[in-house]
Each structure stands twice: as structure tokens, then as C-alpha cells.
Image (cartoon, rainbow, N blue to C red):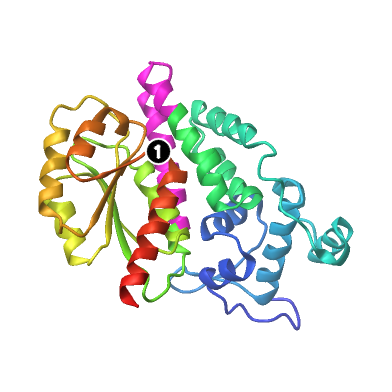
Amino acid sequence: MKKNAKPAILGIEAVAQRSGLSQHLIRVWERRYAAVKPLRTGSNRRIYSEEDAHRLDLLGRAVQAGHRISDVARIPTAKLEELIAKERPGNQISARPLDSNESDYIVMALEAVERLDAEALSTVLARADVDFGQARALEAIIMPLMEQIGDMWEGGNLRIANEHMATAVVVHHVGSILENFRYEPDAPVILTATPVGQLHEAGALAVAILAAVAGWRPLYLGPNLPAEEIAAGAIKSDARAVALSLVYPADDSKLPAEIKRLRRLLPHNLTLLIGGRAAESYKTAIDSNDAVFISDLASLKQRLEQIRASLEHRRQ
């Protein structure tokens, strides 16, 4: 340890909160670029110093300003401070415009998927969070990326191994975002899952993040669940809404009956939301079973805000 250096006393959760970076991104930058070198406890838990937290904050701001993490990761902290000061007067660095080049990130991500390069894909997604913000990255990069991967896989242009790798990386990335959310004590619960036969879970996880941003406490149960398990989870958690993601297949003859059974098992005052790229194919079953068809993430956000406002009104 350097002379007069402050001791490493911060866990990764505290560093993530201070720097505005996700825990996942911090780990990627540490492992891939040696951006910081935290100490380890006897149980192999990372612990960081105040200087580490400050450095990660500077790196995040530098990347927001357009610098590549690979170019700035090993710059001394004093030089990073000078770099940041030069970017904007008063150290006020604005984030990259939201519509700048989301398509470039999708292309880079697809290239990583085709190479079966999980680490590169993880880095692309992590940087997208910094450059665009997590909510925008989710809507404009991650979801279109998964749709393209699904199209390529269904069309025979992508091997199942590549699709599985991409899904695993996205699920881990999105799950790590949820770990960093702080919820209000009275936030209503929304349960997210996919029903029996629906194995693709990235959409359900995306719904969980969007719900968290909208002030809900998401409870993610996973993919391929029977109606009885979804209903039991919703009742036990006192959920105010259930959101199902339907991605593939779009022609499951058993799914309409599963939707009907779930609606019958759920409390009558609980809202059932159903969306995803395959949901349109099941719209008759959705409409006929008092469920709400969700066409896209924007309409989901609007519906969640309406339900939450109604719940708050009832409590008054």
C-alpha cells in the first residue's frame, strides 16, 4: 500500500453507487483493462479505497465524453483529472446524445456474437450503459439486438451456440443492473416471467428493469413456468401486476389455454400484462382473458405508470 494512502474499506456496492457505474461494468473494467486494482478479503471479496472510487468516477465521465475505456483505463489519476477538466468548463461533462449511434453498438454486439466472444459482447453492453444510460441502452440497443439475434437464429443464419451465448451474456448483464436498484419501501410489486414453452428470458428481464425505473419492485421468476407457479408467486408476494414475455414460438397451440388458466388463478384485481415479439400472434387469447396486450416498451411504461398512479390514489 502506498504511503499515506487511504485504506480499502468500500465494497463494490458502495463504489457502484458513488461512481454511477454498474457492478458488472466495474468488474469488466478491472478484469479487462486493469482500471483499478482492489484488494481482496480472506473470502475473496473486493474492497476498494476512496481513491479507487474517485478514479472510477473519472473514468466513467471520460467514457461519457467519448473516450474509449481502453485508451484511458491506465492513465494516472492526476492526468485523468486534467483530461476531465479540459473537456468541459467546471468539469460538467454531458452524456453522449441519445440518438448518436445506437446502431453502431448493435453492429459491434452482433460481431461479438458471431465470433462467440462473450467478453467482447459484455464490454459492448457495459459501455452502452455508460454512454446512453441504462434505460435507453435497454430500449434502443439490447432489445433490438435480441430481436435481430432471434431473427438470425430462426432463419438459420446463426448457430444455436451463438444464440445461447448471447442470451447468457444479456441475462447476466440485465440481472446485474437489477441488483443495483434501490426501491421505495412502498413500491408495488410486479412479477415477471415467461409461461410454459417460452424459453427466451431476456424480454422478461428487460420488463423487470423498465418496471424498476417506473417505480415498481420487480420480482423475476424466470422462464418456462406453468400458470400455477406464476399465480402462486404473485399471490405470495402480493404483486399488483404480472408481466409475461412471449418471444418464441409464435404458434404454440397450448399457450392460449395456459393464459386462460393463469387469468383464472390470479386475483381479479391484479393486472395481467402480456407482450413480446410473439405476443401479437396470441392477441385473441390475450384480449379474451382480461389481459392487457403490450405492443412495445413505451406502451408498457405508460401502462405501468397508470397502474401505479391508480394504486396510489386508492391508498389516499
Residue situated in front as seen by the camera: 144 or 40:
144
The percent coordinates of residue 18 (x first, y second) are 62, 71
- Quarter assignment of residue 245: top left
How many labels sit on residues?
1
| Residue 8 falls within the magenta-colored stretch | no
Q: Give the residue at x 31% y 30%.
A: 280
Residue at the image point whose x is 71% and y is 46% from the top: 97
> From the viewer's perspective, is residue 49 above or below residue 276?
below
Left or right: 116 in relation to 19: left
Mark 1 residue element: helix
Amino acid type at circle 1 is: Thr
Q: Position of residue 299 (x, y in %)?
A: 43, 45
Residue 161 highlighted magenta (yes or no)? yes
The rendered magenta stretch, by its main secondary structure, is classed as helix
User: Quadrant of the rendered structure where residue 291 is?
Assistant: top left
Image quarter in which the N terminus is found = bottom right
- Report the residue that reaches farthest toward the bottom: 4
- The reply, left or right, for residue 33 in relation to residue 86 is left
Q: Which residue is mark 1?
A: 167
Residue at 47% across, 69% down: 45
Quarter of the figure with the C terminus: bottom left
x and y, in percent, of residue 153 in the image: 38, 22
Query: How far across and how far down the image is residue 131, in percent?
Result: 66, 49
Magenta stretch in the rendered image:
149-177
Q: Nearer the viewer, residue 78 or 178?
A: 178
Say which residue appears at 44% left-offset and 53% top-offset: 210
